[in-house]
Image (cartoon, rainbow, N blue to C red):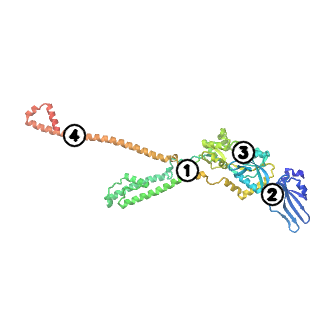
């Protein structure tokens, strides 16, 4: 019987001992995960009890499983096996842990040494510790980039339990001397890329609230309104009594500017006198009010709602894009997945976008996200791991919508550990009661982060499109001003030349008339006075007389 009890195969099924004496039971090693039933009784009553030990030479514990007598018959207990054996009576368990943010957070106490302070696995283990009544002796895993270092501590009998960022796949592949519990935490891998600033407004953002057809309709409406206003004012000026008393100054050019000012919510210099013109203005202002309110509401929604514009949405899109590189953590579960996958797309991704550059397999997650922030690099990691290092990431990152294979984290135990079934039972209870889900939500809250709730400052680069329109308008106005000045100066010179020509023309015309009159008078005088002609017969005397006459 001693040889059977020392055989690990004892837990393969229930064992029944008939009338076993206490001296025999006290000398046997009956682990917690074995079912040894002892039947004692006589012809009138019988009692079936289970016996087990928490430690190899510790106290022998008994629990009644069933009893029989002639009056009441056979009655079985309704408690499950690990409900009856749920207390380990202060057993000391060596626990190997690794300090990982959000998973296992440790702190040093001057009196008690290293203690478990929090983290998801920390909360689960502390709850288990209270539930099954054990004491923990924590062993800190040496600082290593290898996530599976603590599993080797269990395999080398340096610890009874280990937990942290250790995956089931990695354990089962690397070490057959350890076992793991049911999954305590399940992650899904996501691909993260650098998130471009959503506030870098596109050039056509201020045109997007209205469609092209609607913008054309607005322009056409402005032209029709200007024509309508000019027509009403002209007809009112011609046939209306009140408008006849005022100046007709609403030309088509002026009316167009009045309509534009109405759309911009600007007033008028003067109020029309005729009722028809006032009705026209009321219709134009009402239309402008509706347009401005609609445009403002849609533009605010465009600026408020953050729409992610991703270059691709999955790994197939990454391959088709071709400008990004892809990476995973070196010697990790996902690294081995890509190395051994039979999926053609994953093989293509590994061979063309990962394998050519050794830097695509960084040693730590922090180094990986330095590459994400500095170049077109996509990195595969669960969100929960990302949240552990998010404060060290220098840029904003975003996950692709498609998620990929799962990652399970569990407690690691030695191959023949008697704690395995007990921990599995309690983990099932925690899961069915919602306790694991609550601990997960407390660790990784689905609500908004503090950063997303802070005010976002609008910088100059965010409004470059709007300021560019303003700058182009100023430059265009200055160019037109220069053209107007050049036109005015040249037109002034032309007008002066034209004026001089007109003056000279008029002077020449007057001089011609005076010459004709002089010649006529001179000829008349010459007929009456021939001696005068003879005395002034030379050409010089004639020119002088002609000049004096013109003067």
Apparent side of residue 11 relative to residue 321 in the rendered image (left or right): right
Residue 515 visible in the shown view: no
SS at mark 4?
helix
- Nearer the N terminus, badge 1 or badge 3? 3
- Nearer the N terminus, badge 2 or badge 1? 2
- Nearer the N terminus, badge 1 or badge 4? 1
According to the image, label 4 marks what residue?
A: 507
The answer for how far apart the CA atoms under marks 2 and 3 are is 33 Å
Marking on residue 85 = 2
- Nearer the N terminus, badge 4 or badge 3? 3
* Picture layout, residue 285 above or below residue 146: below
Residue 386 visible in the shown view: yes
Marking on residue 456 = 1
- Nearer the N terminus, badge 4 or badge 2? 2
According to the image, label 3 marks what residue?
A: 147
SS at mark 3?
loop
């Amino acid at each position: 019987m001693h040889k059977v009890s020392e055989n690990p195969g004892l837990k393969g099924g229930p064992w029944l001992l008939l009338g076993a004496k206490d001296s025999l039971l006290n000398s046997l090693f009956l682990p917690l995960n074995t079912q040894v039933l002892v039947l004692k009784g006589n012809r009138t009553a019988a009692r079936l009890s289970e016996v087990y030990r928490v430690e190899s030479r510790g106290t022998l514990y008994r629990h009644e499983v069933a009893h029989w007598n002639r009056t009441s018959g056979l009655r079985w207990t309704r408690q499950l096996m690990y409900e009856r054996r749920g207390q380990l009576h202060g057993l000391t368990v060596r626990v190997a842990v690794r300090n990982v943010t959000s998973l296992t957070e440790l702190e040093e106490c001057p009196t008690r040494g290293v203690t478990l302070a929090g983290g998801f696995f920390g909360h689960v283990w502390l709850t288990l510790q209270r539930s099954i009544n054990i004491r923990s002796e924590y062993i800190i895993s040496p600082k290593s980039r290898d996530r599976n270092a603590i599993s080797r501590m269990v395999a080398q009998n340096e610890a009874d339990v280990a937990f942290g960022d250790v995956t089931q796949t990695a354990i089962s592949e690397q070490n057959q001397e350890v076992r793991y519990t049911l999954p305590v935490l399940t992650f899904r891998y996501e691909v993260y890329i650098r998130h471009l600033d959503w506030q870098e407004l596109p050039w056509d953002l201020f045109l997007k609230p209205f469609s092209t057809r609607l913008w054309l309709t607005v322009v056409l409406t402005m032209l029709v309104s200007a024509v309508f206003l000019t027509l009403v004012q002209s007809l009112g000026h011609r046939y209306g009594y009140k408008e006849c008393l005022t100046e007709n100054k609403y030309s088509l050019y002026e009316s167009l500017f009045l309509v534009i000012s109405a759309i911009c919510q600007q007033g008028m210099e003067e109020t029309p006198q005729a009722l028809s013109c006032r009705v026209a203005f009321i219709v134009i202002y009402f239309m402008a009010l509706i347009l401005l309110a609609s445009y403002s509401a849609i533009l605010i929604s465009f600026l408020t709602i953050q729409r992610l514009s991703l270059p691709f949405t999955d790994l197939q899109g990454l391959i088709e894009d071709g400008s990004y590189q892809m990476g995973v953590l070196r010697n990790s579960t996902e690294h081995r997945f890509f190395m051994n996958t039979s999926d053609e797309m994953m093989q293509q991704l590994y061979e063309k976008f990962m394998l050519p550059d050794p830097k695509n397999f960084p040693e730590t997650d922090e180094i990986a996200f330095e590459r994400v922030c500095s170049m077109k690099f996509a990195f595969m990691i669960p969100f929960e791991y990302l949240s552990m290092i998010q404060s060290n990431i220098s840029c904003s990152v975003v996950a692709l919508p498609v998620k990929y294979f799962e990652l399970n984290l569990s407690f690691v135990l030695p191959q023949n550990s008697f704690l395995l079934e007990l921990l599995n039972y309690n983990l099932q209870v925690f899961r069915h009661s919602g306790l694991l889900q609550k601990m997960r939500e407390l660790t990784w809250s689905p609500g908004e982060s503090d950063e997303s709730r802070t005010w976002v400052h609008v910088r100059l680069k965010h409004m470059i499109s709007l300021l560019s329109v303003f700058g182009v308008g100023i430059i265009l106005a200055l160019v037109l001003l220069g053209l107007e000045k050049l036109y005015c100066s040249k037109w002034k010179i032309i007008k002066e030349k034209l004026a001089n020509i007109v003056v000279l023309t008029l002077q020449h015309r007057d001089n011609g008339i005076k010459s004709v009159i002089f010649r006529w008078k001179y000829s008349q005088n010459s007929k009456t006075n021939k001696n005068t002609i003879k005395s002034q017969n030379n050409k010089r005397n004639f020119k002088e007389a002609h000049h004096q006459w013109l003067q």
